[in-house]
Amino acid sequence: MTSTTYSHTRNYAPKDYAEGDAFYEPETMLGLGDRFLWGLAVVAVLALTVGFYTWVLA
């Protein structure tokens, strides 16, 4: 007899998988990947920081 205490966490864990020609990934509210959104946020923060310092030091 096997324990099914944690079966709900194992069966429904978010995962990336390919099926046919389509690629599925866990979605955010905008339907974009979390990695893409975090990368976009980091680039935006870096651009604002560099722009601010160049404006202050100019």
Image: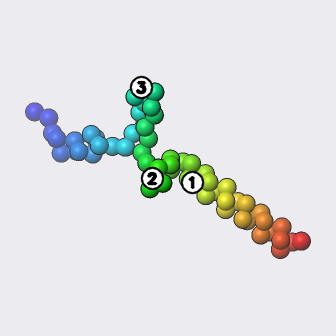
Q: Residue at the left extreme?
A: 1
Q: Marks 2 and 3: in contact by CB < 8 Å?
A: no
Q: Which residue is drawn at 80% across and 69% down?
A: 53
Q: Marks 3 and 1: in contact by CB < 8 Å?
A: no
Q: Which residue is drawn at 54% across and 48% down?
A: 35
The spot of residue 22 in percent (x, y) is 45, 31
- Dot 2: within a 10 Å radius of its alpha carbon, few (fewer than 14), some, or many (20 or more) residues? few
**Helix, strand or loop status at disc 3:** loop
Q: Tag 1: residue type? A: Trp
Of the two numbered discs 3 and 2 on the same chain, state the one appearing first in sequence: 3
Q: Residue 20 carries which label?
A: 3
Of the two numbered discs 1 and 3 on the same chain, state the one appearing first in sequence: 3
* Residue for badge 1: 38
The spot of residue 31 in percent (x, y) is 47, 50
Q: Residue at the right extreme?
A: 58
Q: Residue at the bottom extreme?
A: 56
Of the two numbered discs 1 and 2 on the same chain, state the one appearing first in sequence: 2
Q: Residue at x 72, y 65 (%)?
A: 48
Q: Residue at x 89, y 71 (%)?
A: 58
Q: Which of marks 1 and 2 is in front?
A: 2
